[in-house]
Image (cartoon, grey):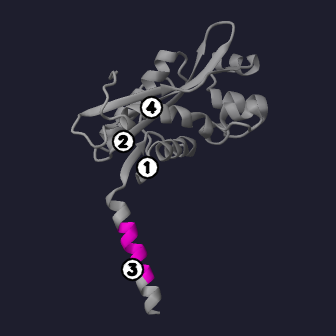
């Protein structure tokens, strides 16, 4: 019994010590796909740092379906800033915004990731990292629906007969047969957006 109590006490102390070092990350969405991508990206970039993740709903300040690259980036940046305003005591704020850009002959799909936070281990003021995912193209069956006003997620569900794919595999998952899901698709961009924070002694342009 004494050994069990001692073990329990040690585990509690370890958890308490870890909590002291945990950095709080607020993701500007309650979509589990985006929260999972943030968790994987931060964990991969900073494997020795403990993190806690919270998702909150905040406005993007852009259309529900961004239709240009610039609008999509603006939505991600607005989400990160609005998350910071809503939860100012956190350490990092993450905005992830998916969008399309219709060049007329084909509809390109991508997402922007914007991370706000302070450079670890420095007294530098808040900095921003941003990165865009790889792009892929939608089939015309989906693109026509998006052009007519349907959001990309529901448009893909309609064409493929899926349900709420944006909180699961996403458009990328539907089109690759599950080889890449939406969360996995976002992770490299989250990692790339964290480059200014990992390299905190270097100077990066702020947008």
Q: Where is residue 140 drawn, in percent x and y?
A: 74, 16
- Where does label 3 land, which residue? 9
- 103 versus 46 height, above or below: above
Mark 2 neighbour density, 10 Å: few (under 14) some (14–19) many (20 or more)? many
Q: Which mark is residue 54?
A: 1
Q: Which is in the foreground here, disc 3 or disc 2? A: 3
Assign a secondary structure to mark 3: helix
- Where does label 2 land, which residue? 92
The residue located at (36%, 34%) in the rendering is: 199
* Residue 62 in view (yes/no): no
Q: Which is in the foreground here, disc 2 or disc 1? A: 2
Q: Which badge, 2 or 1, is on the more N-terminal residue? A: 1
**Which of the two residues, 111 or 120, is positioned nearer the viewer here?**
120
The residue located at (70%, 20%) in the rendering is: 138
The residue located at (31%, 42%) in the rendering is: 120
In the image, is 179 to the left or to the right of 86? Answer: right
In the image, is 137 to the left or to the right of 14? Answer: right
Q: Which badge, 3 or 4, is on the more N-terminal residue? A: 3
Q: Kindly indicate whether the residue at mark 4 contacts the one at mark 1 (C-beta within 8 angstroms).
A: no
- Where does label 4 land, which residue? 193
Q: Which is in the foreground here, disc 3 or disc 1? A: 3
């Amino acid at each position: 019994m004494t050994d069990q109590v001692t073990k329990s006490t040690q585990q509690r102390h370890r958890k308490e010590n870890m909590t002291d070092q945990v950095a709080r990350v607020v993701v500007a969405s309650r979509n589990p796909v985006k929260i999972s991508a943030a968790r994987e990206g931060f964990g991969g970039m900073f494997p020795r740092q403990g993190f806690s993740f919270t998702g909150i709903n905040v406005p993007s300040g852009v259309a529900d379906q961004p239709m240009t690259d610039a609008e999509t980036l603006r939505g991600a940046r607005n989400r990160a800033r609005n998350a910071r305003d809503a939860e100012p005591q956190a350490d990092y704020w993450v905005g992830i915004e998916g969008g399309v850009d219709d060049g007329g002959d084909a509809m390109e799909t991508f997402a922007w990731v914007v991370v706000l936070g302070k450079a670890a281990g420095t007294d530098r003021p808040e900095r921003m990292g941003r990165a865009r995912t790889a792009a892929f193209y939608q089939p015309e069956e989906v693109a026509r629906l998006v052009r007519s006003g349907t959001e990309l997620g529901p448009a893909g569900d309609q064409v493929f007969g899926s349900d709420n794919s944006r909180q699961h595999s996403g458009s990328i998952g539907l089109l690759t047969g599950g080889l890449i899901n939406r969360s996995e698709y976002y992770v490299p961009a989250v990692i790339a957006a964290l480059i200014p924070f990992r390299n905190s002694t270097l100077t990066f342009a702020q947008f």
